[in-house]
Amino acid sequence: MSSPVSQIETANTVALSRPAGGTVADRLDFFVLLVSRAAASLFFLLTAAIVIHVVLRYVAGINLVWLEELHWQLYAFLATLGVASAAATDSHVRLDLLHPHFSPRTKALIELVGQGLFVLPLTGLIGWHGWLAVAQSFAIGERSVNEQGLPFTFIVKAALPLACGLISLAAIARLIRAVPLLWSPVLSDPVRRTDRRRGWSWLLAFGSAGVVSVLALAWAIGRVEPSYALVVLMFASFMAVLFSGFPIAFVLGGIAVVFIGVGYAADFVGYTLNVAHPGTKLYLGTAAGFVNRIYGGLLTKPELVALPMFIFMGLLLDRSGVAEQMMQAMQRLFGRVRGGLAISVVLIGIMLAASTGIVGASVVLLGLISLPVMLGQGYARPLAAGTVCAAGTLGILMPPSIMLVIMADQASVPVGDLFMGAVLPGVMLASLYLIYLLAVGLLAPEQAPLEPAEPLSVSVGVDLLVAILPALALIVVVLGSIFAGVATVTEASGIGAVGASLLAVGHWLRAGGIDEGKLSITTLAKEGWQTCIDAFQITGSIVGILIGATCFAFILRELGGDSLIRLGLESLPFGPYGVIGTILAVIFLLGFFLDWIEITIIVLPLVVGTVGQLDFGFVEPTAFQRPEDFAAARVTANTIWFCVLMAVCLQTSFLTPPVGFALFYLKGVAPPEVKLIDLYRGVVPFVGLQLLGLFLVLLLGGPLVLWLPRLVYGW
């Protein structure tokens, strides 16, 4: 599997090279990309709006409400049309465990069923009710609730039905391409036949295990409440379809639509399935509920505006070569230490994590700039590959992690609080990596040879300062402004995007150009636009899963899924720490098959309410005058601690097979001599270190995670 960035660039090249006068499917995709890609230019407008807002607010003391509202309105178009662009280029995240082994005919059948049963009904339902919301908003002249806010609210509400229409066109294009493959001749290549047999064998194995699990759960749940059996069926349906390899965003949303149909049928025959609200009909208002939750829960939240900004910042640092310059400077500094090259990789991983928060970009970049050098110096292949994978995954935990932004949204806690809570655990994990690498250098010197040492000199120190200080200053400005409460996360992300742009331009000027070519306004504009497109696609793939999970969670709650999970956790014969341990064990096992974003969006909202009410003694009642203040502080402290625990646990999902996305990211850019078995062997010690770190965070939750939040809030 190639890296996410390279996949997107390939998809962009293929999609945009299709002639406008080609087949019907090509014309549909061309139109979808033409319309949706226009929204990518909003990155520049959004960045400018944030910077102007910051200057006016902190320099001139002017706070323009309409300008602040413009941030999330621009984000709404960026996010929704990014989903459409990702659909047209097939850039949405899918579980590729079995899908690559299927024949073209089987893949075409999956496309037909998925697009026809999931995508088109989902986009049709949301698009129609979204259009009704736009018409109603226009009819009543809806505007901002703030007198100084923006008028014409119907314009931003139009983003959702517009995106649904474009996604529907992209789905029709994929249907047109899939139909002829159903009658294509079956390939007779023995390798292909073996590959297909392997795919079906895996599918049969997972399917059988799924059936046994569902039967066991149905038996257990049937002893509690018969209506909850539908919750189990919904989960089982999601897992079964997930392994088909269809895009996860549409699996989540499509399953929700299917169970709306189940609810409609039950209501039609007079059987109430709505456990959350007994006596009401399940299907009534659910489609409109989708629109309300997508608009109110995803598109109008100022905190999520930081998502595309941090992605843009990380990709720009990746493309500019800033990280490569830091790597070279670190190598010169640590050349006298055995294992110094591996230590440099971890330290650069910390810098990348704290400046980008994107795991895929960090792993690929570290793999490109460091893995060939480590192998050339004689490092053992497992050690070199494992170090790169582990260092790259620090981006999931170190602020400004994209995962922490999404966790904060799902858990309803301030993003800055999670950033503060994750700093010390992230540093602790990186320290464990460094201690391990130093130990390997001492105990197994043949695995980490000593590189030729360069004498320390003033030039080495100057090069190190030139490489490190600008990126370090960017980190301090972005995170420091958030921690100090000086700037919001949105404002800090805009500052970070501008700072990354200045770093990139400065690096290109010092290097003499881009790719050793002539630096000009044209080349700068080209690099900036390509970065916008990549960030646009990645944002769309993430927001697509958020939208699908919003629909899935809504129907699951209507069926009583959250009540079922709460009852299950409360009935465990353990104390509070036993409940946390059980949840983390489930998350760890899910990480073998699912990516962090699916686990975060599905599991976190279902368990965070129960976790918030447990008593771990993090907050003293005597510090508060009113009981309600103590209760609120306890919920906040518990939630921050649990989210950081979950983040550390999810970090292992990038390293654990069979999914292990970091492994496949690195394999896509690794030299041919690095085999997949080398990656598996290399990450085993780091998975053990992460589990040790998880235990330490569980044991030292108060002083380790909550030290900075306590310092700020005075708990």
Image (cartoon, rainbow, N blue to C red):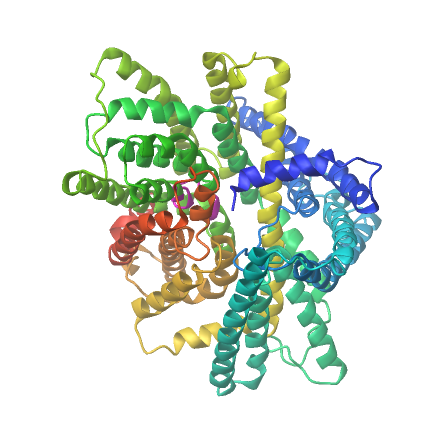
* Vertical position of residue 348 compared to residue 540: above or below: above
* Vertical position of residue 104 compared to residue 399: above or below: below
Q: Tell me the residue at 40%/38% (across/down).
A: 353
Q: Give whichever of 277, 508 is nearer the camera.
A: 508
- Answer yes or no: is residue 603 visible: yes
Q: Give whichever of 198, 613 is nearer the camera.
A: 198
Quadrant for residue 67, please give it.
top right
Percent coordinates x, y for residue 374 in the rendering: 32, 33
* Vertical position of residue 510 compared to residue 264: above or below: above
For residue 642, side relative to residue 248 (left or right): left
The magenta span reads 393-403
Percent coordinates x, y for residue 410 in the rendering: 51, 55
For residue 574, side relative to residue 10 (left or right): left
Q: Tell me the residue at 37%/56% (across/down).
A: 649
Q: Is residue 481 magenta?
A: no
* Vertical position of residue 50 compared to residue 198: above or below: above
- Answer yes or no: is residue 306 visible: no
